Amino acid sequence: MRRGQRLIFVGIDFGAFAIQDLALRRPQRVQAIICLENPAAPHNPDKPPLTGYREMGERHFLHIEYFREPPRADIELAGRRPRSSCARSCGS
């Protein structure tokens, strides 16, 4: 890293808040930020949150559901081509 170089930062969950704060406080150091979060889900007090996520995962790729039932992710990610495995799983 060179002095004064602008960098790209990636944060997940609470780390996303940290890099958002960094970008606001030191914009001269930040070229871009990539924030990864769990998807917002409508709150339904009559349904447990993981039930709601399971239902969402039936319609769209949802990492919580992808890793919930072993060995699906383990088998796909252990393959020779992890990018193609992920692309298939994500529907790309």
Image (cartoon, helix red, strand yellow):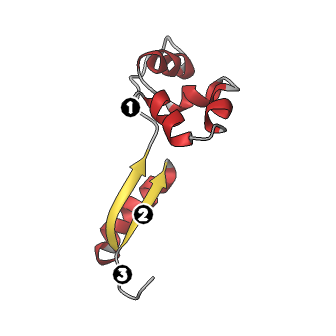
Q: Earlier in the sequence, mark 1 or mark 3?
A: 3
Judged from the image, the secondary structure of the residue bearing numbered disc 1 is loop
Of 9 and 21, which appears nearest the observer? Answer: 9
Amino acid type at circle 1 is Ser
Q: Residue furthest right?
A: 71
Q: Name the residue tied to disc 1.
A: 92
The percent position of residue 81, horizontal first and vertical second, equals: 56, 41
Amino acid type at circle 3 is Gln
Q: Is residue 2 above or below residue 76?
A: below
- Mark toward the viewer: 1 or 3: 1
The percent position of residue 10, horizontal first and vertical second, equals: 44, 58
Q: Quadrant of the C terminus?
A: top left
Q: Is residue 66 above or below residue 16?
A: above
Q: Are marks 1 and 3 in contact (CB under 8 Å)?
A: no
- Residue 1 location, quadrant: bottom left
**Whole-Å distance between the Cαs marked 3 and 2?**
13 Å
Q: Residues within 10 Å of mark 2 (few under 14, many from 20)?
A: some
Q: Residue furthest top?
A: 46
Q: Residues within 10 Å of mark 3 (few under 14, many from 20)?
A: few
Q: Residue at x 40, y 32 (%)?
A: 40
Find residue 9 and name its label.
2
Judged from the image, the secondary structure of the residue bearing numbered disc 2 is strand
Q: Name the residue tied to disc 3.
A: 5
The percent position of residue 32, horizontal first and vertical second, equals: 32, 63
**Whole-Å distance between the Cαs marked 2 and 1?**
25 Å
